[in-house]
Amino acid sequence: MMCCSSRRPGAALAVAAFLAAATGPVSPLLAQATPEAGPVLDPNSPLDPLPGLGVDWPDLTPQPGEPAPAAGGVTTEAGADLHYEVRFDGLDPEELELITAQFDALSTLRAGEKQPANVAQIDRRAREDADLLAELLQSRGYYDAQVEPRVTPEAGRVIVTLAADPGELYRFAKVEVRGLDAAPKQADALRQAFGVKPQDPVDAAAINAGTAALRQRIGQGGFPFASVPDPEVIVDHESKMATLVLNVEPGGARRYGKIVVPPGALFSAKHVQQIARFRPGQPYEASDVEDLRRALIATGLASAVTVTPEPGATPDTVDIAVKVDRAPPRTIAGELGYGTGEGARAAISWQHRNLFPPEGALTLRAVAGTREQSAAASFRRSNYRKRDHVLTADVALSHLDQPGYEARTFLLGAGIERQSNIIFQKKWTWSAGVQLIASNERGAINTLTSTVRRTYLIGALPGTLAYDGSDNLLDPTKGFRLSGRLSPEVSLQNTVFGYARLQIDGSAYQRVSDRVVLAGRIRLGSIVGASADRIAPSRRFFAGGGGSVRGFGYQAIGPRDADNNPTGGRSLAEFGAEARIRFGNFGIVPFLDGGNIYRAALPDFSGLRYGAGLGVRYHSSFGPIRVDVGTPINPQKGDSRITVFVSLGQAF
């Protein structure tokens, strides 16, 4: 970066002048003092002029005809505290705007502007900030800039004016970036990345930004060992021109060699290569190295990761040395929640994220709630055979007592998926799996009878495909999402029969101001191949609740049996719209939802139920926490007038 002179010569001169004054005759500011205690300052004595400063103390005495300060207002005594205001003079408005942020961050006047100060303090701050403003102007290319501080009274306060004379703007007569001939294919792109050219102002910020951009670009261009030192700037004050020389040593373009890990490393070189987005023989790019570092941290098994380019086995290759500091592999987590219709729910889990290396995690989970009791074990191997692919296996035993059915279920499942996460939000995700389910369930057969209990044996091949074009996983403000789920299933209940479940979800987000985001969603579902009374109640569609139509209880929408219990159905249609209004870390969300369940295979969009309400959001560092309170606009018999939903993340 460019060298700059010291920023505080005025303060040193003031101190020297004060000491010189102190060695002369005793000032009236000094009262009687003992040798042991030293001189004692009398705050009510008038200020003597300080020689060598070049500026007299401002005369704050009211002139004839001017009103005296009101009681409690500004006084003119030397020790009095005064309020002041900072103004600038002599600067072009555009130039002033460019340096205002830097000045405000470094200014001693700005730091104490809201606090009263005495005349001596104000004068000292003004001199220091005059030096600061001059240096900021010089860094912008005004090498002859001079700034004079002026302290004057005005309407019961002090006005500090920094009067600047910028002088002529210095420009570059010549800009030389040497050494790029060693990278002929990228020389033009590298010069363009640096950006500084002849006739540009001698602007230190632009030079530093150009140097940083050149260092980044040359690394991305395949030169891991390039040397880009700080440029040398020579200023000619007579011609008011400057010359810049930057000596670049590219060090030769390289291609990837091998991954190198220390003995006993957390991950083998083979597994790290599996995670990396580059392969041996491809041109080196610095962004690939940073991507690998972030991906290793995302495993949750590393507390720190160092990825360093090293000379390879041949002059044209670069090896990548990876050092991973281990993080604690075990986690115990708890969860509490409540939803109208879903009841209270508490969950606890234990996880070992590397019980089966590499990245083979085992999770044990238990849930106790008013409507759910379950125990489950899950195996999950991340980065399975390929980056971002996850292999899963599950076994679970559960008891669910939902408004639409009651089920005691045993499940075995396995699958492979490509998931999105907060660190790497992916455009496309998918999953494919297999499930074997044995379930004893009590639910309604149709709308004319009461519930009955049956046992079902089900085999399913669920699959999903999703596109995420939003800008944030938990709190999107623009873009859209679209997903589809297809699950062909075979069921054994007296006889064997098959059917297929299809569901499509879409949502869109649009920011309309800095504080307001409009969001909307739709959901359509269909089951074809079997009648509703043959399908297990837990495999039917239901609507209502916090992730569905808010204002209605969980599973409360749709056809009901003779005892007024929800029966579920073969098709559904839902929509939702809300305005997300944010105030700092908090927000409010008025919403309107609607939907219905149908016994036919396709929804006919009749008899839609509508719910409306207001939500509150707290935007934490890991995503919004939501509390939604809704009410049904056209309720059915037995519907609650108020529903409450609490969860992490937006509703959709």
Image (tube, helix red, strand yellow):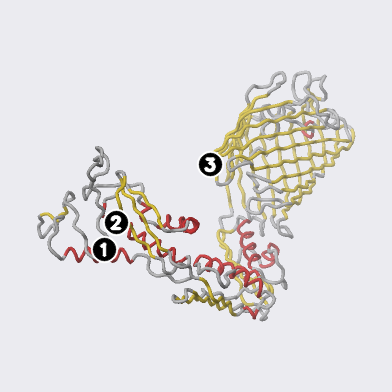
Residue on which disc 3 sits: 585
Q: Quadrant of the C terminus?
A: top right
In the rendered view, would you say 438 is above or below 597?
Answer: below
Residue type for callout 1: Leu
In front: mark 3 or mark 2?
2
Residue 63: percent from left, percent from top: 23, 46
In front: mark 1 or mark 3?
1
Looking at the image, residue 67 sits to the left or right of residue 253; the answer is: left
- State the image quarter where residue 384 is shown: bottom right
Q: CA distance from mark 1 to mark 2?
A: 10 Å
In the rendered view, would you say 289 is above or below 447?
Answer: below
The residue lying toward the viewer, choosing from 498 and 527, is 527
The residue lying toward the viewer, choosing from 92 and 582, is 92
The residue lying toward the viewer, choosing from 167 and 462, is 167
**Mark 1 neighbour density, 10 Å: few (under 14) some (14–19) many (20 or more):** some
Residue 12: percent from left, percent from top: 29, 66
At x 30% / y 58%, what residue is drawn? 124
| Dot placed on the residue nearer the N-terminal end, 3 or 2 | 2
Looking at the image, residue 304 sits to the left or right of residue 75; the answer is: right
**Direction front: furthest residue:** 65
Residue 439: percent from left, percent from top: 77, 35
Q: Secondary structure at mark 3?
A: loop
Residue on which disc 2 sits: 123
**Mark 3 neighbour density, 10 Å: few (under 14) some (14–19) many (20 or more):** few
Residue type for callout 2: Asp
Residue on which disc 1 sits: 53
Q: CA distance from mark 3 to mark 2?
A: 41 Å
- State the image quarter where residue 643 is shown: top right
The total of numbered circles placed on residues is 3
